[in-house]
Each structure stands twice: as C-alpha cells, then as structure tokens.
Image: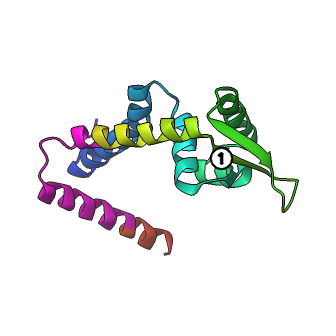
Amino acid sequence: MHEETSEDTFFRELGGTCAELRQAFARHVGMSPHRVQLLVRLRRDGETSHSDLRRTLGIDGASVTRLVKEFEAEGLVGRRLDPADNRYTLSALTPAGERVAADLERSHQAYQERLLDGLTPQQQETVTGVLRRIRANMIGQESR
C-alpha cells in the first residue's frame, strides 16, 4: 500500500469540496441543483431559448422542457414560440418567478458568506490564486 502524498491529499480535498459545493446550496433551499440554476439563469439572462438553457446548464433538451413545464405549472415561468423562428421555444420568468429567483440569489449570497466564515480576505485571495494557477497548468498540459 502506498502512502498518500501531499498532492494526493490536496486534490482529494479539492475534489471532495467541489463535489459537495455543487449540491450543498440546492439541498439548503430544498430544490434540485438544476431547478436553482434554471431560475437564476433566467433571472440573469432574461428570456432565453431552450437550446441556450440546455447548453449553459449542461443538461439534455428533454430535461430543460420538463423543468420549464414544472415551473410553468407553478406560475414561475412562461414560455412562447420564438417569433423569429417558431422551431424554438423561449422561456422567461413571470413576476412570481422573478421574486423566487431574487430570493434564491439573496439566500445564495448569505450562504456563501457563511461558508467563508473565519477566512480572511487574504486567505480567500490566496485560494483564488492557487485555483487559477491550477487551471492555467491544466490548460498548459492539455495543449502539449
């Protein structure tokens, strides 16, 4: 059996934290991650085509349609055919959906602040710099 190296420990901790972060806020608000992402994306981007939602959320078209229909039934999202090309469907938040999405964003900001509790701004900057360096190194490895 081989002993864990400092690199092994670093990437195990980083990977575990990233995997947990993707799910933690959604659990905190009692919603699936894709539901949270779709509402926030529509709030930020305004009326959006389903194909753009599929691409930005990284989920298949059937899942986008299902989510949008669920939100439509809840009165949070409206949809219509794209007047420029009726092969495409556009979705937008209703006023009720706008309120829910705004509440989600405020809740997410407070949640992030709690997660960073006890970390100084300098520590946050250090971690951000480390993560940027790792990404740059990955890009450098991939281009070789």
Instruction: Name, please, the residue furthest toward the top.
Output: 30
Find residue 79 and report its horizontal and vertical position in percent: 74, 43
| Range of magenta residues | 112-135
Can the viewer see residue 70 in this picture?
yes
* Residue 81 higher or lower than 101, as above or below: below
Queried whether the magenta region covers residue 126, the answer comes back as yes
Residue depicted at 68% across the width and 55% down the height: 52
> Which residue is disc 1 drawn over?
92
Q: Nearer the viewer, residue 13 or 72?
A: 72
Q: Nearer the viewer, residue 107 or 31?
A: 107
Instruction: Name, please, the residue furthest toward the front.
Output: 95
Find residue 141 and report its horizontal and vertical position in percent: 44, 69
Find residue 44 and report its horizontal and vertical position in percent: 52, 54
Check the picture and name the quadrant holding the N terminus: top left
The amino acid type found where label 1 is placed reads Ala
Residue depicted at 13% across the width and 59% down the height: 122
Instruction: Name, please, the residue furthest toward the right.
Output: 86
Horizontal placement of 104 versus 59: left or right? Answer: left
Q: Indicate the secondary structure of the residue bearing disc 1.
A: strand
Horizontal placement of 6 versus 55: left or right? Answer: left
Can the viewer see residue 3 in this picture?
no
